[in-house]
Image (cartoon, coloured by chain):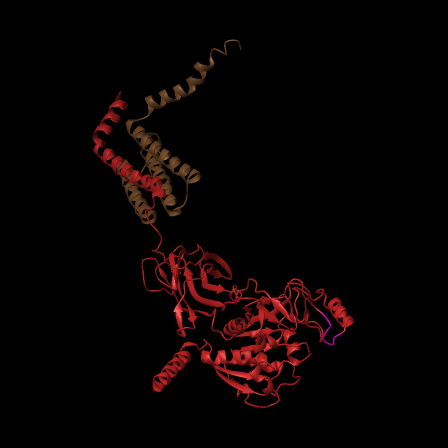
Amino acid sequence: MLSFRGLFWLLSGLVALVNSKSSAGDSVLVVVEPNHRDNYSIFFDGLKEQGYELTFRQPKEDGPLIIQDDVPNFSHVILFASETKNLGKDITPQSLVHLLSLNTNILVALSTKQTQLSSLATEFSLILPPPGTPLVSYFPERQDSASLIPVAITANPVVSKDLPPVWFSGVPQALGSNPHLVPILRAPPQSFASEIDGGSADALVEAAEKGGEGLWAGSQLSLVTGFQTLTGSRITWVGGVSLFNDELAQKEVAKGVKSGNAQFAREVAAWTFQESQVLRIDRVEHHLVNVTEPKEQYTNNDNIVYTAYISKYDVKTSSWKPYSGLTELQLEFTMLDPFIRTALPPVAGSPGKYSVTFRAPDRHGVFKFVIDYKRKGWTHLHSSTTVAVVPPRHDGYPRFLSAAWPYYAGAISTSIGFFLFSALWLGGEVREIKKGKGSKAE
Amino acid sequence: MAPKPTSPPATAVNPLQTLWKVYNDNTPHRLKFIDAFLFFLMLSGIIQFAYCILVSNYPYNAFLSGFSSTVGQFVLVASLRSQVNPQNKDEFKDVSPERAFADFAIGSIVLHFFVYNFLG
């Protein structure tokens, strides 16, 4: 019985290990105060169960390094030491940006204190209120402090909408106009940033006037904000680290309803660590209609079939699965400007295949097939294939067109006329001359 | 001036009729035969040109060859006509009608060779 149970655990552990690797790798560095580590046991255990290898590091420690010899040591980094002024020597805003460009994902918690991270947040178009001003809301009426707020989950591209509200306590972010931002959790409409945490009202008003974006208030604020870089790596800014802790995960949000914190944290981590909403283009093909081989160059007005195969990362099997769910994929055929921009619809019956047939423009030059799919929350898809479009060869033009029949008839009738004329002229010569002579004689 | 209203039909028809009559009476059959061919070529050229302007000049090479075949043939036939015309005997003393026709035939064959080369 014991051995059976042991085997079961071993198997389930193996399954979990196989099941849950992210598409980017499964080593995670967690920077957290050692005495706070146990506060997040639900979140960390969840990640471990998923198959992530967590490495803990104290904020003041110098190792393990996040980047060694310009190679990232971990696939993902979690920065929960939000109140610490100085993280280790190697964790600086510059090194974090470098980490993102090396395709490492980062989950960052902010706090109401001014740290290096809050100045880094500004670089990501997040506009933080002045230090010491957390989000406050007096609605709905509740026993807790005004800065611990239940936040209902609104429409967003990352987290499922049917979660119960999550408890949030921390700093809100006004969003700049950066298109790479993915707001995940919006503040409730009645909430605002206030100075209860040791900040001053004057500083708040002054900052609001200086920034020109108004007060930090209402539902345009974001509490959890994702950011996807051009290389596909993801960084998520969370306004308060308490969102992940066990206490709020267990806390009831209404009578008998547990808060959505645990599940929310899990889904935010899944998005950040490139488990969910990760797409890739496996390959693209192009060829003439009714032909299978691609061509280096096409001729004006050729009918071209363009096909793209797109996969989505599937966490359950930790593999790439063909994905036909993109409804608004577009194909552009460009020579500087898109000469053709057309929908690239999924092909029914063959998963992951998107195909379109179109006629090449009546222009010659070097063209590109371009797929450029950028949607909030999803991996950006980009594919570019260069082909030449050339005019027809001298013998490639269409011949004997129906429009030219009058000209053909004209030329042929002239020839026939010439032959008839010659025949009659020669045949009638004697008679004509005789006649001519006769008439002259007359 | 009074009879004018009644006379126009007569006077208007008269010059043309006279012209036609004089032509009919004074022109040898040969030349009439040549003129018929010229008239046909002219019609064919006019039709092609009108089609080109009104409908489409798209296969432009076809138009060029079709139209130039009628024009070229017209020129050749016209020169044949002037050479075989008895009235021009003084001018073409050393050109017999047979020689004129041979020139005409060779010129036409060369012309048609070019036309068909360019037509398709």
**In the figure, what tint was chain B given?**
brown
Q: Residue furthest bottom?
A: A62
Residue A195 colored in magenta in the image: yes
Residue drawn at (37%, 81%) of the image: A8
Nearest the eye: A327 or A335: A327
Residue A432 colored in magenta in the image: no
Nearest the eye: A413 or A87: A87
In the picture, measured across the screen, residue A383 lies left or right of residue A412, that is right
Is residue B73 something one can see in this rendering?
yes
**In the figure, what tint was chain A given?**
red
State whether residue A246 is above or below residue A292. Answer: below
Q: Residue A34, image x and y in percent?
A: 59, 87
Residue drawn at (47%, 81%) of the image: A48
In the picture, measured across the screen, residue A280 lies left or right of residue A78, that is left
Quarter-of-image position of residue A138: bottom right
State whether residue A380 is above or below residue A330. Answer: below
Quarter-of-image position of residue A214: bottom right
In the picture, measured across the screen, residue A48 lies left or right of residue A63, that is left
Q: Which residues are magenta?
A: A194-199
Q: Residue B69, image x and y in percent?
A: 35, 42
Nearest the eye: B12 or A334: A334
Number of marks in picture: 0
Q: Main secondary structure of the magenta part?
A: loop
Q: Quadrant of the N terminus of chain A?
A: bottom left
Q: Residue A363, image x and y in percent?
A: 45, 56
Q: Quadrant of the C terminus of chain A?
A: top left
Is residue A245 something one can see in this rendering?
no
